[in-house]
Structure formats: structure tokens, C-alpha cells
Image (cartoon, rainbow, N blue to C red):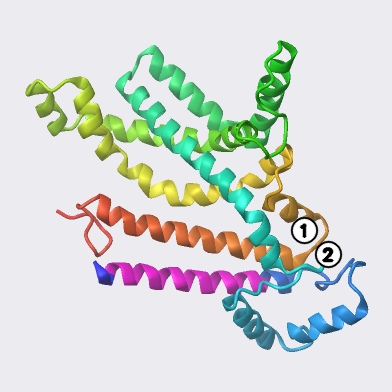
Amino acid sequence: MAKYILKRIVYALATIFLLIFVTFLMMQLLPGDPFTGDKAISEVTKQILMEKYGLDKSVLEQFWIYFKNVLQGDLGVSTQTGREVTRIISESFPYSFELGMRALLIATVGGITLGSYAAIRRGRMGDTVAMLISVVGVSVPSFIVAALLQYFVALKLRTIGINIFPISGWTTEFSKWLPSIALSFGSMATISRLMRTSMLDVLSSDYIKTAKAKGLSEKDIVIKHAVRNAIMPVITVLGPIAASVLTGAFVVEKVFNIPGMGKFFINSITQNDYTMIAGSALFYGAFLVFATLIVDILYVFIDPRVNFTGGKGD
């Protein structure tokens, strides 16, 4: 097991190194220079940044300086605000992280419940309704769901005297529900479809038939045997879904005016703030690698059929 975990960690570190290289390469290929269109930073400050990050040196020397800075947690300075990218991320990421974790919890619990219900009610009205919800969830972008929730849940309820959910903001507990639901809707649909397929396979297996023959109740069979085994494919995709939920929060944050990373990331794109774009991309890429690594390691402990060469045991 130790060899397997070490191997996964080495793969993760190699992936992060490749990510740093690709991020640096993208910055080099972008037109202009990091200060194109900048009016907020003085010439003296520009000269200091040029010397600090070796922008007047060769590409290889610049990459080596960039790589060392990244290892020390220095992602550069925003050319539009003059603030350190690391500081901007550390101040805004907690909002995005809380929103993402809430959405992930809703998506996981809701997706597993909806998928299990659809499988148990296969071919019936409940199955049709559940799959219709999942199709809508996959098809409709999160910012459309966000706008619909703002209109029908926050705004319309006010007209009949029910003022519970604010239209925007991230101040009270109720203000966090609508953006979390909007962000979770697509992932919940994906998980529910995956759970339904896996659940149908499990429910048709021999050991479930044996459990039924022994007289176990449907409730015990589903909870104690079927869901536990059917949930494995869902756990496998939770890492990428977690990163997807966090990175997909940018637009939802903008719609609900949440002070997360989305505001800075969108502004950095519109203002050609290369260091902020690269820093955000690198941060989220590393987060995705870390989340996938955690899931890979947890999967071994959860599913004993997995052997340490990466496949399934006999």
C-alpha cells in the first residue's frame, strides 16, 4: 500500500510540474507583455517587477525564476492592482471554497438519493421524473439556474410576503442556499445518472437475489448492501467533480455578487492581467490534482477489491 500511495504522490508532483510549465508557456505565448494596457503601476514599480521576475532574461531563466517563486508560494504580482496574487487568492478563496463545499455536499447527497430512487423505481413514474430532473440539470448552465432561482425563489416569494432568501450577497445563512443549489444542480444530475446505472447493476447481481431469498426487507437490502457497493463509481468521480464545482463557481459568484475568486478571475481576463490569470489557473489545477490524489488513496481503503497495481483484484 505504501508503494501505491508513493507512486500516486510522484504522479501528482509530476503533473503539478507539468502544470507549472504549461502555465508559464501560456503566459509567454500571450500577445504583448504583462504590463500591456496597464496604467495603475508606475515605471519604477514596473522596473522593480522586471528585475524581480527576470522579465529581461532568457525564457529558460525566466522559467527557472518562476518555478522557484511558485515553490515558495509566490505567484507574482497582479499587474492591474499591484497586489500579490497569493494574497488575493488567500483572501477570496475561502468564500469560493465554502460555496463549493456546500454545493458539493448538496450534489453528492442529492445525486445519490435521486439516482438510487430512480433505480429502485425503474420504469415507473418516479424513475421518469428523476431522470427528467437529471437531464435538465446536465443541459442547463448553472448561471441560468442561478437567475431562475433569483427570480422565482427570491423575488417572487417576496410578492406574496415570504422574504426568506436574499437575491444576492453572502452574509446570512439563507443567503448561501440559492448560490449553493445553483452551483450543485449540474453535478447532482451527473451523480444521479451515474448512481442510477451503478445501482441497477448492483440490484441485478446474485448476492442481492440471495439477500431477497433470505427474506431481508427491501429497505435493508438497499441501505446495507446495494447503496454501499453502487456508490463506488460516484466516489471515483468526486475528485474531478469537486474541482469542477469550485472552478465553475466563477459565474455563479458574479450573479450573486459573492466576494470569491470569480470576481478577480473575470476581471483579470477582461483586463489582460496575465499573472492573475496564470496564478488562478495554477492554483485550481493544483487543487484538482490534490483532490484526485486524495480520492485515489481513499478508494483503496473503501474498496478492498482494488489492488495496489491500480486494477481490480480477482
Q: Residue furthest front?
A: 172
Helix, strand or loop under label 1: helix
Number of other residues with Cα within 10 Å of mark 2, as a class: few under 14, some 14 to 19, many 20 or more: many
Magenta region, main secondary structure: helix
Specify whether 194 is left or right of 273: left
Magenta segment, which residues?
A: 4-25
Q: Amino acid at mark 2?
A: Gln
Is there CB contact under 8 Å for labels 1 and 2?
yes
Image spot of residue 59 (x, y percent): 70, 84
Q: Residue furthest top?
A: 160
Which image quadrant: the N terminus?
A: bottom left
169 over 264 or under it: above or below = above
Helix, strand or loop under label 2: loop
Q: Amino acid at mark 1?
A: Ser
Image spot of residue 134 (x, y percent): 49, 28
Q: Nearer the viewer, residue 185 or 25?
A: 185
**Residue that badge 1 annotates:** 268
**Residue that badge 2 annotates:** 80
Residue at horizontal 24%, vertical 50%? 303
